[in-house]
Image (spheres, rainbow, N blue to C red):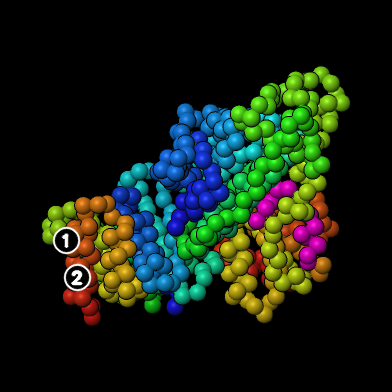
């Protein structure tokens, strides 16, 4: 099965019933497959006029209670930024798939990149927080997409599947589980204000058609949901909560894999470069090479770096100039070696082995 | 038993579909592992196209082809880009109606495009002729697995045409054995 098709199938397994999107290489197969499958399952597929409208429709659908998703790549992702901020501000659960291609601008439509990792975290204006996942196989395109809906519903944030072209277009063997775990949105308790933070800082979600009158606005709002845009205290409390509801749970949200924790030289990866590192480790078992592989990249779980107490260097192969390497540097005194790879090709095992040997 | 197969030609020949069919045969009908990847340009047709399949009996880590042992070449440009540097122990199946050059490694000349046009009446099945020849020459997947994977992948109404193309490829490969 193709990675993009596995993504769509994972969404369907999670109960996604709404997809709005605009086709763009290398993400088009996600929309194509949803267009073929969703209507037959009683869901709604809409090809929108552009990406601005796509994310807007997804936000609207999410407020009716639907599990809603869109899929895009670089240029479309840029167009979505304004309404991604709206989703963050209105605490709308939704899933946004970005099959990353070479940028900036139209760049390399058919080639792989991982250069939108900072954009997904900080691309819209203002302070907010999101969750971003990074699959390294067709199997994970399925599993992580399905899991993304649970995270979106639990934390009421936009959740990003930050895949790359290689894993999106790759076809490989996949095992489809009978069912996927499902976490529901916590419903709003009658009588409680719609934006009153619960114990976990996440307000209950008003169920559509059950008598709640809710005002949903991108303006700074109080717990009633009413605009309150000039009150510094309300603004500070709201923004701090939008950030803290995710950041304070980052070690609970964390999802990573550790190989050889006693290693001195440790690769840190997410997405398809993980496959190269796995090959290097497989081919050189005697070298005891460490590997920390993030399946969730944001919120960044810095405690994961402490899984390697003897680390002498962290090597970070990425299909960008070092976006996550910079984040890793912020959290550790261990030297971080950037291993950027450009143009769409994957790092080769020889190249990563050589980078490691150069440190000995 | 890791095998790395690379297909190359131009957009519109079914270079990517060929790799998908071969990978499907290996996974769905032979029970092996396979990873298929591709490189293509923004053009709909006519641009250079390359796709790869790795077939193995254990899980595949690095998903890209490093050193193909089987090459299927369907254009002169594809030969120059991917075929000319084929390793000495590789085997190449080349469409002799479109590729002028010959490699240093072992090779089979299959006039797939001419055969598809003249014998089967549809140039579009040249890639299936190449697949038939490839599987007969290398045994990389079982012949019945290839046939099932082809039937899964081709449009309704073209099944018998495609099976005839596959069989023609197998005949051509048998006839040219020992070259």
Q: How far apart in space, not on screen, are marks 2 and 1 (Cα)?
A: 10 Å
Against A18, residue A142 (above or below) is below
* Chain bearing mark 1: B
Q: Quadrant of the C terminus of chain A?
A: bottom right
Against A27, residue A219 (above or below) is above
The reply to whether residue A113 is in sight is no
Residue range in magenta is A295-308
Measuring 41% from the left and 43% from the top, which residue is drawn there? A40
Measuring 32% from the left and 63% from the top, which residue is drawn there? B149
Q: Secondary structure at mark 2?
A: helix
Against B112, residue A86 (above or below) is above
Label 1: how many Cα within 10 Å (few below 14, some 14–19, many 20+): many
Q: Locate residue A161 relative to residue B140 in the image: left or right.
A: right
Label 2: how many Cα within 10 Å (few below 14, some 14–19, many 20+): many
Mark sitting earlier along the chain (2/1): 1
Measuring 82% from the left and 42% from the top, which residue is drawn there? A199
Q: Are marks 2 and 1 in contact (CB under 8 Å)?
A: yes
Residue B172: which disc? 2
Which one is nearer the viewer's eye here, A219 or B9?
A219
Measuring 36% from the left and 67% from the top, which residue is drawn there? B25
Which one is nearer the viewer's eye here, B107 or A40?
A40
The residue that mark 1 highlights is B115
Q: Secondary structure at mark 1?
A: helix
User: Is A50 colored magenta in this rendering?
Assistant: no
Against A60, residue A327 (above or below) is below
Position in image of residue A31 (x %, y %): 46, 42
The reply to whether residue B118 is in sight is yes
User: Is A300 colored magenta in this rendering?
Assistant: yes
Q: Which quarter of the figure has residue A264? A: bottom right
Position in image of residue A351 (x %, y %): 60, 65
Q: Locate residue A58 relative to residue B49 in the image: left or right.
A: right
Which one is nearer the viewer's eye here, A359 or A181?
A181
């Amino acid at each position: 099965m193709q990675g993009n098709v596995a993504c769509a199938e994972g969404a369907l397994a999670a109960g996604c019933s709404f997809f709005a999107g605009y086709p763009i290489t290398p993400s088009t197969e996600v929309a194509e497959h949803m267009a073929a499958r969703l209507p037959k399952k009683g869901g709604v597929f809409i090809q929108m006029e552009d990406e601005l409208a796509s994310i807007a429709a997804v936000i609207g659908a999410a407020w009716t209670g639907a599990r809603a998703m869109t899929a895009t790549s670089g240029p479309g992702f840029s167009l979505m930024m304004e309404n991604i901020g709206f989703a963050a501000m209105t605490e709308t659960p939704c899933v946004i798939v970005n099959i990353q291609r070479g940028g900036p601008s139209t760049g390399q439509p058919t080639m792989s990149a991982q250069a939108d990792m900072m954009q997904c975290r900080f691309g819209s204006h203002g302070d907010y927080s999101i969750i971003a996942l990074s699959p390294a196989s067709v199997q994970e395109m399925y599993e992580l997409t399905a899991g993304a809906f649970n995270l979106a519903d639990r934390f009421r944030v936009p959740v990003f599947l930050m895949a790359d072209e290689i894993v999106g277009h790759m076809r490989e063997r996949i095992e489809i589980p009978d069912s996927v775990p499902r976490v529901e949105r916590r419903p709003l308790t009658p009588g409680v204000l719609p934006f009153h933070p619960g114990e976990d800082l996440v307000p209950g979600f008003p169920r559509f058609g059950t008598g709640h009158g809710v005002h949903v606005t991108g303006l700074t709002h109080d717990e009633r949901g009413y605009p309150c845009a000039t009150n510094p205290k309300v603004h500070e409390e709201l923004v701090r909560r939008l950030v803290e509801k995710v950041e304070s749970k980052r070690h609970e949200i964390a999802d990573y894999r550790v190989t050889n924790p006693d290693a001195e030289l440790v690769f840190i990866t997410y997405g398809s470069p993980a496959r190269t590192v796995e090959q290097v480790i497989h081919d050189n078992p005697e070298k005891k090479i460490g590997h920390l592989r993030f399946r969730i990249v944001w919120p960044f779980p810095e405690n994961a770096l402490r899984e390697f107490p003897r680390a002498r260097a962290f090597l970070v192969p990425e299909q960008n100039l070092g976006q996550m390497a910079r984040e890793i540097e912020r959290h550790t005194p261990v030297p971080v070696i950037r291993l950027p790879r450009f143009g769409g090709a994957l790092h080769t095992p020889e190249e990563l082995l050589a980078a490691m040997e150069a440190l000995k | 038993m890791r095998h790395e197969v690379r297909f190359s030609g131009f957009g519109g020949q079914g270079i990517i579909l060929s790799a998908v069919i071969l990978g499907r045969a290996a996974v769905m009908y032979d029970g092996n592992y396979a990873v298929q990847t591709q490189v293509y340009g923004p053009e709909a047709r006519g641009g250079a196209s390359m796709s790869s399949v790795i077939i193995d009996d254990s899980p595949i880590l690095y998903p890209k082809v490093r050193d193909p042992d089987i090459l299927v070449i369907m254009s002169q440009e594809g030969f120059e880009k991917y075929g000319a540097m084929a390793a000495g122990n590789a085997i190449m199946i080349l469409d002799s109606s479109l590729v002028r050059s010959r490699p240093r490694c072992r090779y089979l000349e299959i006039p797939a495009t001419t055969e598809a046009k003249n014998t089967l009446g549809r140039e579009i099945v040249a890639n299936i002729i190449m697949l038939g020849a490839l599987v007969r020459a290398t045994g990389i997947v079982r012949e019945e697995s290839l046939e099932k994977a082809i039937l899964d992948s081709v449009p309704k109404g073209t099944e018998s045409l495609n099976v005839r193309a596959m069989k023609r490829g197998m005949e051509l490969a048998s006839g040219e054995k020992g070259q």
